[in-house]
Structure formats: C-alpha cells, structure tokens
C-alpha cells in the first residue's frame, strides 16, 4: 500500500473503490484524494470506467487451470505479521491468484486496475476519453473472442432493438452491416453512467472490429481518424450521438467502411 505522501497506484485506487482496503489504508487514500487534485481526478476516472471485462472473458476464465493455481497459492507462506507499507495492496495471496489466473488464461490482466484504462488521456476531454476507454476494451479482443457462427438476421434485429430503446436510435441489420465483415453481437455497455452501444464484428482479414455509439450533446462533427492501442479509429458525431469505428484494418479501408455505415445510420 502506498504511504500517505506517495500518489496511490491505480491498483490502490481500484481497491479503494471496491472496498478492499483496510480501514487504515482507506483513510490514507482518502487523505491523498482530498489533498491532491490529480489523485482525485484519477479516482473519479477509474470509478466511472465500468465496462464488463469479466463478462467478455468469462469463457476464457472458466478454462483457467484452477487446481494448478491453487497448488501454487498454497505454496506461498501466509504472512504472520502486518503487510509492510512498501508492499503493494495487490500483492496479497488472494489478489495474486486472481491476477495470475487472468494473466495465464487471457494473456493479459483484464481487471480495470491492472490495464489502467485511459492512461494518458485527460478526464476533462469527454469525447476523447470514451474512445480511449473503448479502445482499451476492444484491444482485449482476439478472433477467438468472437468465434462462432454469425447470428441470424432475426437475432441481430432483436439485439439491435435493445440498443434502440436506450439510445434513441433506429438500427437494423442492414443499417449496421459492413461489407465482407461478419456481424457477431450487439450489446449494451455503460460508460460514465451513460448507455454505450457496441456492435462487434469479425473481419476475416484483420480480426475484431467494432462500431460504438454514445449519446452526445457536443454537436455534429465530420469524420476524423486517429490511432489508439495500435488500432485505427474513425470517429464522428451528429446532433445527438457520437460514433466510432475501431479495428485493425488499414486507415483508408476503415475510412471507407465508416463512410458507408455513417450514411446509413439514422436517428
């Protein structure tokens, strides 16, 4: 756990949010939040980043070599005294098991505290921030994440209907279809207390791709291109919504695909 005069790590802040610290540790973090504006902003950001990583990777985590991990855990001596102040809060036996299981199975740690969602982006730039959060999330996807047959048109329409209700959209399988790219699922996520629609696709050439939508009152914006987490992002907005198409395809192809879907999406 960090000392009172050291800026808490994301692991400490997330443990504070989740109520996993001791009373003394929580008091130290709270004091730092009250004293340091940057720490307070980071705590607020981590508290708002609420994407369902566990749900997305449940099939992988279910396959974890649990017996082996438990044997490794049993071999770690239990601490007989209080944890030294220099020992990180996440280095307990319980959290070691969780972090190791996620690392072995997914190849990365999927806990929001470990991946550090949105690091390097200003929490005050709303439009930039939500794209950063989505990029962190989509970067966890592999082709295996979206493996399996594409849902029927009826199933696609049913999934999209749930997005329409929350976001005030009018989407159909034809509206969101991407040329040569398989629709895999549409799901409703949450970001900063607002509904976030994610339509996931699997491009046979470059892997996972996603069209994401949130409500926005920032006004219309012409399409623009940026790179996040090694992926290309085309983003734009209309009077009521902000959109982003993210994937590993080349920039010119992503731009062309985005232009096509942008012309079909109607509010």
Image: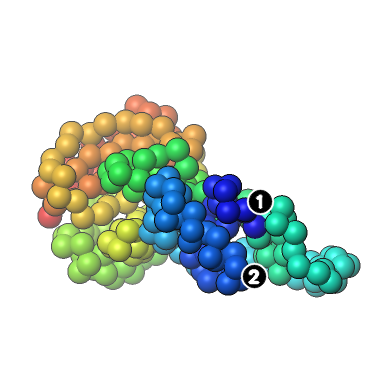
Tell me the residue at 27%/52% (across/down): 213
Query: Left or right: 30 with respect to 233?
Result: right
Q: Which residue is mark 1?
A: 107
Q: Is residue 241 above or below residue 120?
A: below
The answer to whether residue 180 of the structure is visible from this angle is no
Q: Which residue is mark 2?
A: 62
Q: Quadrant of the C terminus?
A: bottom left
Q: Say which quarter of the image contains residue 263.
A: top left
Where residue 260 appears, as percent x and y from the top left, is 23, 39
Q: Is residue 151 above or below residue 226?
A: below
Tell me the residue at 36%/37% (across/down): 233
Q: Nearer the viewer, residue 128 or 240?
A: 128
Where residue 32 appears, as percent x and y from the top left, is 49, 54
Secondary structure at badge 1 equals loop
Secondary structure at badge 2 equals loop
Gap in Å between the C-alphas at discs 2 and 1?
14 Å
Tell me the residue at 23%/47% (across/down): 242
Within-10-Å neighbours for mark 2: few <14, some 14–19, many 20+: few
Q: Quadrant of the N terminus?
A: bottom right
Within-10-Å neighbours for mark 1: few <14, some 14–19, many 20+: few
Q: Nearer the viewer, residue 33 or 189?
A: 33
Q: Nearer the viewer, residue 264 or 218?
A: 218
CB under 8 Å between discs 2 and 1: no
Query: Left or right: 81 with respect to 24?
Result: right
Where residue 17 appears, as percent x and y from the top left, is 48, 65
The answer to whether residue 91 of the structure is visible from this angle is yes
The disc placed on residue 28 is none
Residue lying farthest top? 252
- Pick whichever of labels 2 and 1 is earlier in the sequence: 2
Q: How is the image coloured?
A: rainbow
Tell me the residue at 40%/39% (across/down): 121
Where residue 248 appears, as percent x and y from the top left, is 46, 37
């Amino acid at each position: 756990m960090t000392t009172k005069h050291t800026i808490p790590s994301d692991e400490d802040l997330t443990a504070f949010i989740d109520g996993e610290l001791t009373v003394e540790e929580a008091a130290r973090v709270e004091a730092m939040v009250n004293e340091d504006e940057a720490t307070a902003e980071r705590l607020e950001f981590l508290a708002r980043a609420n994407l369902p990583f566990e749900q997305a990777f449940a099939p992988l985590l279910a396959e974890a070599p649990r017996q082996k991990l438990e044997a490794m855990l049993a071999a770690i001596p239990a601490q007989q005294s209080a944890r030294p102040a220099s020992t990180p809060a996440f280095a307990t036996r319980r959290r070691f098991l969780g972090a190791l299981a996620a690392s072995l199975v997914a190849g990365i740690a999927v806990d929001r505290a470990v991946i550090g969602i949105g690091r390097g982006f200003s929490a005050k730039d709303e439009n930039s921030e939500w794209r950063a959060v989505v990029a962190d999330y989509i970067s966890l996807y592999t082709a295996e994440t979206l493996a399996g047959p594409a849902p029927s048109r009826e199933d696609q329409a049913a999934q999209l209907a749930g997005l329409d209700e929350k976001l005030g959209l009018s989407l159909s399988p034809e509206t969101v279809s991407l040329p040569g790219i398989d629709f895999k699922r549409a799901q409703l996520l949450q970001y900063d207390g607002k509904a976030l629609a994610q339509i996931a696709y699997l491009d046979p050439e470059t892997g996972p791709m996603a069209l994401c939508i949130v409500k926005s009152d920032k006004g219309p914006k012409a399409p623009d291109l940026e790179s996040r987490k090694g992926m290309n992002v085309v983003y734009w907005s209309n009077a009521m919504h902000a959109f982003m198409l993210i994937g590993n395809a080349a920039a010119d192809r992503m731009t062309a695909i985005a232009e096509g879907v942008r012309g079909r999406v109607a509010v």
